[in-house]
Amino acid sequence: MTRFILRRILQTLLVLLVMSFVIYSLIGLMPGDPIDIMVASNPNIAPEVAATLRKLYGLDQPLILRYWRWLSAALSGDLGYSRTHSQPVLTILLPALWQTCKLLISSFTISVILSFALGIAAARKPGGWIDGLISLGAFAGISVPVFWLALMMILVFAVELHWFPASGIANVGDGSFRDQFVHLVMPVTTLALATTGGFTRFVRASMIEVLRLDLVRTARAKGASETRVVLIHAFRNALIPVVTVMALSFGVLFNGALLTETMFAQPGMGKMIYDAILGNDFNLALSGLLFATLVTLLSNLAADLAYGWLDPRIALQ
Amino acid sequence: MSELVALDAVSVHFPAGGGGWFGGPKRVLRAAERVTFSIERGETLALVGESGSGKSTLGNVVAGLQVPTEGTMRFHNRPMDKDTWKAARRAIQIVFQDPFGALDPRMPVSAIIAEPLLIQGSTSAAGRRERAADLIEQVGLPRDALNRYPHEFSGGQRQRIAIARALAPRPELIVADEPLSALDVSIQSQVLNLMKELQEQHGLSYLFISHDLAVVNHLVDRVAVLYLGRLVEIGGREDLFAHPSHPYTQALLNSVPRIGHKRARGQTIKGEMPSPLNPPPGCVFHPRCPKAADICRTEVPALLPTGRGGHDAACHFRE
Amino acid sequence: MSRTEVAVSPGRLRWRRFLRHRAGVSSLAVLAALILFALSAFVMRRFGFDPDATDLFARFDPPSRLHWLGTDEAGRDELIRLMVGGQMSLLVGLLATCIGGVVGLIIGVCAGYFGGRLDAVLMRFTDGMIALPLLPLLIVLGAVDLTKLGFSREFAHSGAAGFWRIIVIIAIVDWTAIARLVRAATIAIKERDFVRAARASGAGPAYVMVSHVLPNVATPIIVAFTLTVGRVILFESVLSFLGFGIVPPTPSWGNMLNNAQELVTSAPALAIYPGLLIFVTVIAVNFLGDGLQHAFDPRSER
């Protein structure tokens, strides 16, 4: 088991390293470089000065060298300065990460609870009208463009009904818990609606599979009540694959978070990365992308370990 | 008679996990260990053993599906390698156990039968169609079967199609890997008779792999008995059945129910076959052998003549 | 005689199973209608409708006899723009899926057939792809400056570059699902006896892949392709919406929502139509995929 954990952690680190290089190279391919931007904002800088600056910052060096320099700095905790915010990257990154975590965790919790309830209800009678209705809803959840769903939420609940604010995380001068909560309702609901669809389909499929197994037939034969059969015997066995898939869907969830944050103007990781890319804020974009990757990889690692722990057969391999 | 194909001290080992960065010690599955036998022209040799005895692995070696880890295979007295195999592919064909997996469900029967010719690339499309029509009748199926798909046929009919495919390139040897064990008993004898007829018509040799000694009795000339990847006894059918020399062969024969014989004539086998990942030292059969002595635990018995012509056994106490 | 002798062909059996899947059948009809809708732009042009003709005196016009769905923020006819935008979105969906699908198919078959190193590398790679937060990466790819990759300035800023860029981006990230699927199917098929029989007759890898593997993995691939088209259309809409996809003035359902955020108060209809079309298209594609899956997989019951 220790060997299994060790190997997975090493693999995670390796993926992270590879990804950091890929992202670093891609960021380098974005339009302009820091000196171009400096020149654009201050036309007094002569071309010779720009060239000297370029040399000073090492921008004329080959990619590998620049990457290596960035990597050693990053490993010692120096992620550089954000151009647009004029602050160290970490100072901006950490609050944004916290904001995204609030959004992710609350919508994840809601969609897990919802999808279990709906998935089990649908699986009890596959092909029945309840199943049909839930499946239709689940397909709608998978198929809806998240940003458009957010738009429609704004249209209905903010513009037409004035129930919730359309954007931001708190009103100026307020910021009480109630105020923050009200601001979170629509983003969380949007993201939860979009993720519940896929989860529900998976819970349903997994439950149907398990309900066919002999262990469930045995339980029925023993005279266990239908509720008991479904909730105790079947659900417990359906849980393992479901939990894994849910934990593995963190990357997908992050995509949704990026869109919801952008639509509802929430200062989280997603919006930060998006703004950083739009604003040519290389350091911030790079670190933001890497943090997002790291969080996803860690959740996958956790899923793997949980799977190995729940199902002893896995660790043996 | 002259030698058609021969295995000379052939071993097949498979890596069985382990190795790599964190994998621990490498493990090796010894599917076949220094097996030597030959098949004459027009002869049928049975390869008999329990599941896991390595008989299918050896069948794969003879059919060119498995490269031996050690040892050589000879065909027409030429040692086989990549180049010589190319020419020999036509002459050695294989028929499998499971008639449902052996035919591509997406191909019409005519294409299945003519496939070896297509792969060999020596026959025109018209020639292939003609040959397929010819063969389908030889194996006792109606001509209109050619345009149908495998799922429309029963197990026995599919096995006939598989045999037709094997016959297509006019082979000299057919490796039949348990061709009957997936079939109903009534169908078994039909297919067996078909194979016999075809052998007489075309002068074929068979390597007939089976776990069923009763079936073997009807078709084969000689029998080779495998245990845990080792050849433990080989001899003419009648001689071997009448005077089994190796305790394992004796036990195998005792487990065959026969009309007119009392059930237990001697020892039957106790226990289970050990894992080929970790074979016992000395004679591999000693943990289950009623005659096992100290020498059996330390020394590997060689395959030696029993004194009756062409009948060898690998036992320190061969009879 | 056994039951199999009176059996119908697998194709007809599947068609019958598909027809029993009501959602799948109606999706097929909906998709056909959507394609017809997108293609009718060609007819509309004949009658003088132009997706690019602006009319600053007719901004945000409500539906009228001249403009059946009204006009947008530049006074362009919304209906014809939805039709042309549909062509873009559907074309990107199909093309990106096909390119990514062919790449995934080739890599998956090779990895499954040859195994070993190639297979290990591929699987690590797809594992990584599945684990990553894709959207931020797609945005970075969308922001890549094509001149830095050696393309000419004119090309880098043309509409065609935007079109091909989004197709390539999506194909790059979306081949892995198909590759995984094909790999698994290939591994299952290459050990089947009919493949071994072909190899015993001297068949090489190329023959086995083309004659045996591909025909036998066709059905799961069709299902996966269908589902991928839906996902790709969603990706396209997101990227175009964020400004990294199809470049205006060429309309796509995604970039027609570009300004929708500001418009949602003043002209909500403009924010509703394109999104609704994306939604209906993707849901129809997903139901179609479900129907096909049902038709192909005899185990699935409904």
Image (spheres, rainbow, N blue to C red):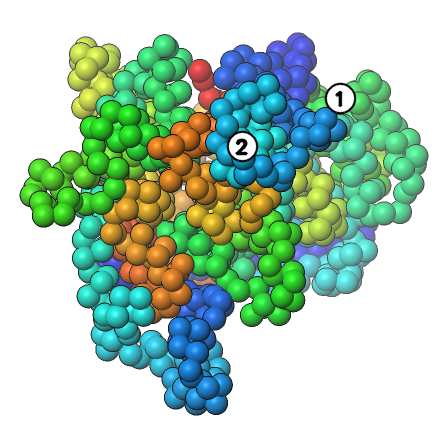
Residue C182 visible from this viewpoint:
no
Asked if residue A123 lies left or right of residue B150, the reply is: left
Identify which amino acid the numbered label 2 is placed on: Ala
C-alpha span from label 2 to label 1 = 66 Å
Q: What percent of the width, then of the height, locates residue C213? A: 64, 41
Tell me the residue that label 1 is attached to.
Answer: B148
Look at the image and tell me in which quarter the C terminus of chain C lies.
top left
Q: Mark 2 or mark 1, which is nearer to you? A: 2
Q: Decide: few, some or many residues near mark 1? Use Cα within 10 Å; few <14, some 14-19, many ≥20.
A: some
The front one of A236 and A112 is A112
As drawn, the residue found furthest toward the front would be C57
Tell me the residue that label 2 is attached to.
Answer: C58
Q: What percent of the width, then of the height, locates residue A219? A: 22, 17
The front one of C130 and B193 is C130
Residue depicted at 49% across the width and 37% down the height: C73
At mark 2, the secondary structure is helix
Question: Which picture quadrant has residue C48?
Answer: top right
Question: Which picture quadrant has residue C5?
Answer: top right
Chain to which mark 1 belongs: B
Question: Which picture quadrant has residue A135?
Answer: top left
Residue depicted at 22% across the width and 28% down the height: A162
Marks 2 and 1 share the same chain: no
Q: Decide: few, some or many residues near mark 2? Use Cα within 10 Å; few <14, some 14-19, many ≥20.
A: some
Asked if residue A187 lies left or right of residue B129, the reply is: left
At mark 1, the secondary structure is loop
The front one of B37 and A88 is A88
Q: Are marks 2 and 1 in contact (CB under 8 Å)?
A: no
Residue B273 visible from this viewpoint:
yes
Identify which amino acid the numbered label 1 is placed on: Arg
Q: Which mark is residue C11?
A: none
Chain to which mark 2 belongs: C
